[in-house]
Image (spheres, grey):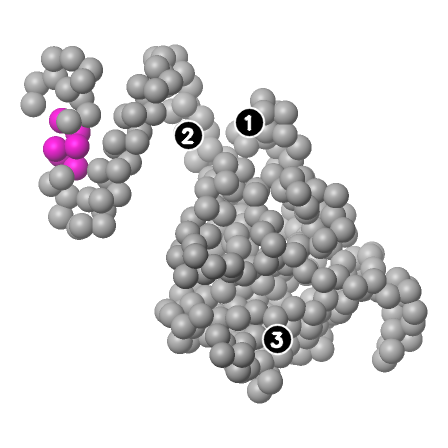
Amino acid sequence: MIIERHEDVTPAVLAVMEQTTDPRLREIMLSLVGHLHAFVRDVRLTEEEFRSATAILNEMGQATTDTHNEMVLMAGSLGVSTLVCLLNNGDRGATETQQSLLGPFWRMHSPQVDNGGSIVRSETPGPALFVSVRVQDRDGAPVSGAEADVWHSSPVGLYEHQDAEQAGMNLRGKLITDEAGRLWFRTVKMAGYPIPTNTVVGRLLKAQNRHPFRPAHLHILIFKAGYKTLISQVYAPDDPHLDTDVQFGVTQATIGAFGRHDEPHPTDPSVETPWYSLECTFTLEPGEARLPRPPIQ
């Protein structure tokens, strides 16, 4: 089709998209082109703005490394990650779900930890946190043999790959649920933190007068054959940025009950006060067990 005027562009592109063999890819491309062209018309995108936009996308790709994923960071900052998560879980968006963001800092091959062990691998000052988790199916029956990957930031708000003072894989571990569907471990109470602001996402936040902070949270990824992989975060309810998470990740179902204890620990007198405890239950849905692609190495 020879283009004579701007109204001809969209029908010409849509006609080509219709030739896509895969039906799902065809559906996606038709919708993408329709919305993208409508957006360009709606804002009357200038040539200079178009060139700037393509340069920004190039910069985001170049900023993504083995230890930083700018694309995932931007998707969270625009609320896309949470929207995709909620639309695809909880009976496809109809009910509450514990599924949450994977985030940009999950790594594969975290070390195995026995139940009752610690995921602290180097000196990490901060209040002790004792975590107890129960994994169940939709009927409330325990799920034994489920593999749970846990990770979180330090009490100064840094993941171990961002902090030269932390040992490799510090505050990361992989545990297996017992016959009662339970796992438990010791760590330190995590802190909220600012996302990286020295690249494209940081400039966007500054332009929008937004702060860069995520509230304190524990990540968990639970994997077992026969169940849909559960990816969740458990947020500390006392964090000052709980209502204004820069990644829009906090949902009611992901706010945890972090208990503060000012009395001595009942079994370990070496634990300094105050110490904290966290108990949570996760429900797995039937489905295909698949691990996501790790955003960093």
Q: Which mark is residue 57?
A: 2
The amino acid at mark 2 is Leu
Asked whether 288 or 281 is in front, the reply is 281
- Residue 90 spot, x, y in % from top left: 45, 60
Say whether disc 3 or disc 1 marks the residue closer to the N-terminus.
3
Decide: is 250 above or below 61.
Answer: below
Q: Is residue 258 above or below residue 297?
A: below
What whole-number distance in Å separates the C-alpha atoms at marks 2 and 3?
42 Å
The residue shown at (51%, 59%) is 96
Residue hosting label 1: 204
At a point 71% along the width and 54% down the height, the residue shown is 236
Q: Are marks 1 and 2 in contact (CB under 8 Å)?
A: no
The residue under the point 31% across, 19% down is 41
First along the sequence among labels 2 and 3: 2
- The alpha-carbon separation of the residues under discs 3 and 1 comes to 39 Å
**Residue for badge 3:** 134
Q: Is residue 51 visible?
A: no
